[in-house]
């Protein structure tokens, strides 16, 4: 083993290099090891920035989810009102796309922590697919 490949215990290098601590838990539970190794800011500031980013993502995620649930109800109502599967196919395609994008953010499980701008872009795309599907449904 050379000097650059030292043994790492609990996410911290033994030897020359300190690395981030990324146990399978929230990095906010150990900001010193998970964040401050690279981000030289006070712990309270880092925590507040992460929480603010996650709050914004959560609110946008809720908008996307509310829009999608409303859209699904509209598809169901259109089916009950007599629209055929063929007529509903374009709207359902948009519904599947919107659901996929929303599910991606849910499965990614950081609520915007890792890439807040990308999370916002994906959620915006989900909302756009929902609205385009609603427009298609009203044709």
Image (cartoon, rainbow, N blue to C red):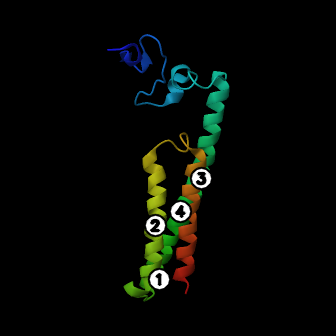
Label 2 near label 1: C-beta < 8 Å?
Answer: no
Spatial CA distance of label 2 from label 3 is 16 Å
Q: Which residue is mark 3?
A: 120
Question: Residue sitting at 48 percent across and 72 percent down?
Answer: 94
The percent coordinates of residue 109 (x first, y second) are 46, 43
Spatial CA distance of label 1 from label 3 is 30 Å
Of the pair 1 and 64, the residue shown nearer to us: 1
Residue 52 falls in image quadrant = top right
Question: Residue sitting at 58 percent across and 22 percent down?
Answer: 36
Is residue 137 shown left or right of residue 44? left
Q: Which residue is mark 1?
A: 78
Quadrant including the C terminus: bottom right
Q: Residue furthest top?
A: 15
The percent coordinates of residue 110 (x first, y second) are 50, 41
Spatial CA distance of label 1 from label 2 is 19 Å
Question: Residue sitting at 48 percent across and 21 percent down?
Answer: 19
């Amino acid at each position: 083993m050379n000097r650059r490949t030292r043994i790492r215990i609990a996410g911290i290098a033994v030897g020359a290099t300190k690395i981030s601590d990324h146990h399978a838990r929230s990095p906010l539970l150990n900001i010193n090891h998970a964040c401050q190794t690279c981000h030289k800011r006070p712990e309270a500031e880092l925590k507040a920035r992460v929480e603010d980013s996650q709050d914004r993502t959560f609110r946008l995620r809720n908008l996307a989810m509310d829009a999608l649930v409303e859209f699904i109800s509209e598809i169901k109502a259109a089916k009950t009102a007599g629209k055929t599967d063929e007529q509903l196919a374009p709207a359902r395609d948009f519904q599947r796309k919107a659901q996929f994008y929303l599910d991606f953010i849910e499965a990614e499980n950081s609520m915007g922590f890792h890439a807040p701008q990308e999370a916002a872009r994906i959620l915006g795309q989900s909302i756009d697919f929902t609205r385009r599907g609603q427009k298609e449904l009203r044709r």
